[in-house]
Image: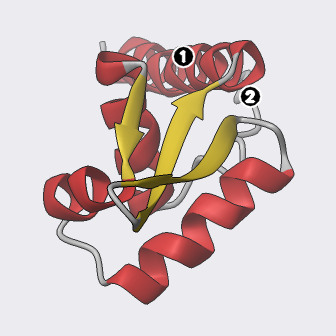
């Protein structure tokens, strides 16, 4: 069996959800991500920082109509990491099927 290591950064339900939304949307505001992932603001903030720390996303803080706004954007590094993660999962599934045949 040839199991690839799963990316520990992406192997978290909330971080995977954040990346999935950003893949589809390209960029999203904090409140949109909070709504889509059903996460608490605190937990979402922690997970966004973890993704930013490994350069999977870029975080832009700005003001809109005197209110702070946080926008998250997926990076090319993040997109590639997500693709690799999905490929690794697919290889797990294929390996599992070949053993059961």
SS of the residue at dot 2? loop
Q: Which residue is mark 2?
A: 4
Above/below status of 71 relative to 14: above
Which quadrant of the figure has residue 22?
A: top left
Residue occupying image coordinates x 43% and y 28%: 27
| Horizontal relation, residue 53 to residue 46: left or right | right
Q: Which residue is mark 1?
A: 91
Quick one: label 2, few (<14), some, or many (20+) residues within 10 Å?
few
Nearer to us in this view, 32 or 91: 32
As drawn, the residue found furthest toward the right would be 54
The answer to whether any part of residue 71 appears in the image is yes
User: Decide: marks 1, 2 in contact (CB < 8 A)?
Assistant: yes
| Horizontal relation, residue 100 to residue 38: left or right | right
Residue occupying image coordinates x 40% and y 60%: 13
Quick one: label 1, few (<14), some, or many (20+) residues within 10 Å?
some
Which quadrant of the figure has residue 34?
A: bottom left
| Horizontal relation, residue 83 to residue 26: left or right | right
User: If the image is split into quadrants, where does the C terminus sit?
Assistant: top left
Q: Position of residue 77 (x, y in %)?
A: 77, 20
Mark 1–mark 2 distance (CA, rounded to whole Å): 8 Å
Above/below status of 84 relative to 45: above
User: If the image is split into quadrants, where does the N terminus sit?
Assistant: top right
Q: Which mark is residue 62?
A: none
Above/below status of 40 relative to 89: below
**Reading the chain from its start, which is encountered first: label 1 or label 2?**
2
Residue occupying image coordinates x 71% and y 42%: 7
| Horizontal relation, residue 69 to residue 5: left or right | left
Nearer to us in this view, 86 or 76: 76
Q: Position of residue 25 (x, y in %)?
A: 31, 21
Which quadrant of the figure has residue 14?
A: bottom left
């Amino acid at each position: 069996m040839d199991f690839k290591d799963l990316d520990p950064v992406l192997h978290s339900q909330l971080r995977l959800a954040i990346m999935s939304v950003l893949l589809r949307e390209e960029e999203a505001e904090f409140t949109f991500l909070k709504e889509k992932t059903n996460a608490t603001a605190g937990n979402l903030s922690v997970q966004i920082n973890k993704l930013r720390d490994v350069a999977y996303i870029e975080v832009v803080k700005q003001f809109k109509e005197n209110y702070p706004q946080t926008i998250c954007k997926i990076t090319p590094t993040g997109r590639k990491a997500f693709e690799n993660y999905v490929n690794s999962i697919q290889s797990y599934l294929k390996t599992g099927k070949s053993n059961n045949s």
